[in-house]
Amino acid sequence: MSFSSPLASLYTTLQSVRLSAENNATLLRKNEAATRAALIDPILRALGWDTANVQMVEPERTIGGELRVDYLLHNAAGKPQVVVEAKCLGASLDKHGYVSKVLGYALGFKVQTVFITDGMQWHCYSNLHKGNTEATIFSLAEDDLLTAALQLIQWLDAAQSGHGIVEAPTPDLAANPVATEPAKAPKKAIAKTSKSVTASADSFVELNHINTLQLEPNQKPKRLRLPDGSMRDIKSWKDILLEACELLLQKNTTLSFPFPDKSGKKTALFSRQKPLKGSSYATVYQGQPLYVYTNYSAPSCLANALYVFGKLSDQDKQQAAAVAF
């Protein structure tokens, strides 16, 4: 049985797109629609975005009669998540007018991430709620394609917006007459007291207080407030760890690897090499591939997230990290 790696599949798509740009440069330099069809659409599809599904990838979305975007990407709940603005191949992507548009898109569509691309050059603007106008830039024409693929997965993988992810169903004990007793909580469960969490989506509990609460079976966090004040929709305890790691990688440019996890013994939380055992998440740091080890239990994910947040500088910690259920 053969298996296909999502990263390898995307890498193959990028090779094809780069070749298409070279062979059709004359046409693509003067035709934005052709650039979208030949260069941008294939990449979005390789990242899990169904460009034929207008509820997932909405083209030519207009708001207020003035702002019009080429692609408005929606998350699994139907909310705007990412804007992708397309330009003809070879267009200058750093014009002042384009940057002003980016902030307009962020405010108008209430998104935190905006891309401007000509299919080869990709400018990513993130954390726009803080007025950030500094772009992460990578090129399919000039950069190593593996590095570019990892960048695209980091910022644009549809799974990060909830697409293609199906939560495991909760067992129906009523349908199983043999189960006469409720399942016992695992010894290392996060819950420690009899106080039940019934917080609304806007009621946050600080991460370092989670172990004082009683969680319902299979109860998971739904929203994360990062120490810098930004918000993230999440689905699991692992998401908290990943968001913590991404924040540290963005804020600290002097990390060395391998970077040990909280236990500091056998496992590296960050490593340049993909771990031989256990699950991991591929990202990019300082233009090089990096892997985040994720094969942790829920309590260990939480403990390592707090450990990572503790590595942030004081200026990046405006408030305590917290979650809502």
Image (cartoon, rainbow, N blue to C red):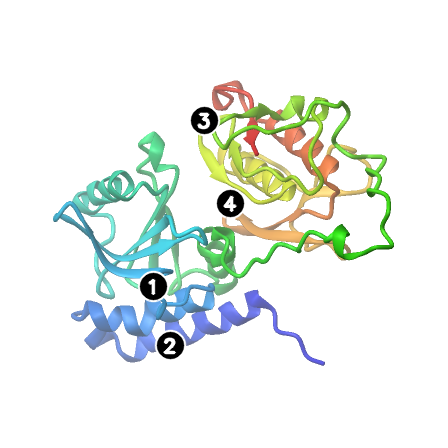
Distance, label 4 to label 1, CA atoms, is 20 Å
Mark 4 and mark 3 in contact? Answer it, CB < 8 Å.
no
Q: Who comes first in sequence, dot 4 or dot 3?
A: 3
Secondary structure, mark 2, is helix
**Type of residue at label 1?**
Met
Q: Give the residue number, with chain letter if any, for mark 3.
A: 229
Say left or right for 234 vs 65.
right
Q: Which mark is residue 19?
A: 2
Verify CB contact (< 8 Å) between mark 4 and mark 2: no
Residue 44: x %, y % from top left: 40, 64
Identify the residue at image location x=48%, y=19%: 318
Mark 2 vs mark 3, CA separation in Å: 42 Å
Q: Is residue 300 above or below residue 46?
A: above
Q: Please state which of residues 25 and 299 is positioned toward the viewer in this rendering.
A: 299
Q: Amino acid at mark 3?
A: Gly
In terms of sequence position, does the residue under pointer 4 or pointer 2 come before the other?
A: 2
